[in-house]
Amino acid sequence: MGGKFIVFEGVEGCGKTSQMQLCAEWLQSLGSSVFLTREPGGTELGIDLRRLLLQKSEDKPISEVTELLLYAADRSQHVAQELKPQLAQGKYVLCDRYIDSTIAYQGYGRGLEMNLIHQLNNIATGGLSSDITIWLDVDVEVGLARKRGENVGLDRIEQETMAFHRRVQQGYADLAKSSSSRIIRIDGSLSKESVHKNIQEILSIHLKKLP
């Protein structure tokens, strides 16, 4: 594949979406072709799955395994329909969440079996891994306070307990240690401008090392 696959990860309110947009604008200013997408919801099917996954339902909650399978279905369609074709065209693909989110949220957060998660991720991705994953590291309390300040209402995942979000954060920390060549930590508590500058510096260095 001729393109480069860059993923943005982190807990709720870490600034992924805004930093991904800034990164896209920067890459485009350098003459690069950029494709922005997200999980869940990067395809027409994914939009429907995203609604099912994030809407709060008190009387008929989604089971934890069902949640995992829906994320896998979204990813499988996303990889086949968008990610691989866009990368084959030589584009920089910037994605808001990917496989590490499933490990952090469904593995660490929900406590589901890691072997099952890895198997489903392998099936859904067909072996496609990010070239670089930017982990925007912020305290969960700070991130959730940012989300509440947006006044748009919290989704089903954002409404989870603080203990759940702390387990997710630990998941990202462990992933960053075990996959340090792929996952790069960025301090997400800094100003938006400082975070963007740090991302630019990291990508400028690491993209040159990629084939």
Image (cartoon, rainbow, N blue to C red):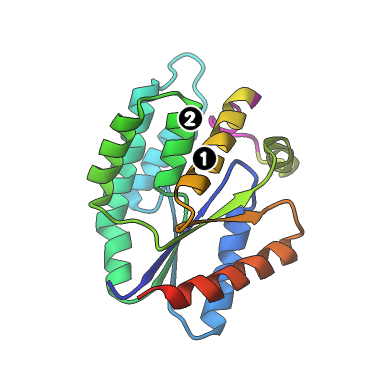
Whether 38 is drawn above or below 53: the answer is below
Report the span colored magenta. 153-162
Assign a secondary structure to mark 1: helix
The answer to whether one can see residue 14 in this image is yes
Instruction: Kindly identify the residue that appears in the image at 61 percent across and 72 percent down.
Output: 201
The tag earlier along the polypeptide, 2 or 1, is: 2
Q: Is residue 94 left or right of residue 199?
A: left
Q: For the image shown, how many numbered marks are present on the structure?
A: 2
The extreme bottom residue here reads 31
Residue 145 x/y as whole percent: 74, 38
At x 54% / y 29%, what residue is drawn? 156
The residue at the far top in this view is 59
- Is disc 2 placed on a helix, strand or loop? helix
Asked if residue 28 lies left or right of residue 113, the reply is right
Identify the amino acid type marked 2: Tyr
Q: Any mark on residue 108, and which?
A: 2
**Residue 161 in view of the camera:** no
* Mark 2 → mark 1, Cα distance in angstroms: 10 Å
Q: Nearer the viewer, residue 118 or 3?
A: 118
Which residue is pictured at 66% across the width and 66% down the height?
198
Q: Quadrant of the N terminus?
A: bottom left
Prevailing secondary structure of the magenta residues: loop
Residue 54 in magenta stretch: no
Closer to the observer: label 2 or label 1?
A: 1
Residue 142 lies, in percent from the top left, at 73, 40
Mark 1 sits on what residue? 174
Query: Is residue 160 part of the magenta span, yes or no?
Result: yes
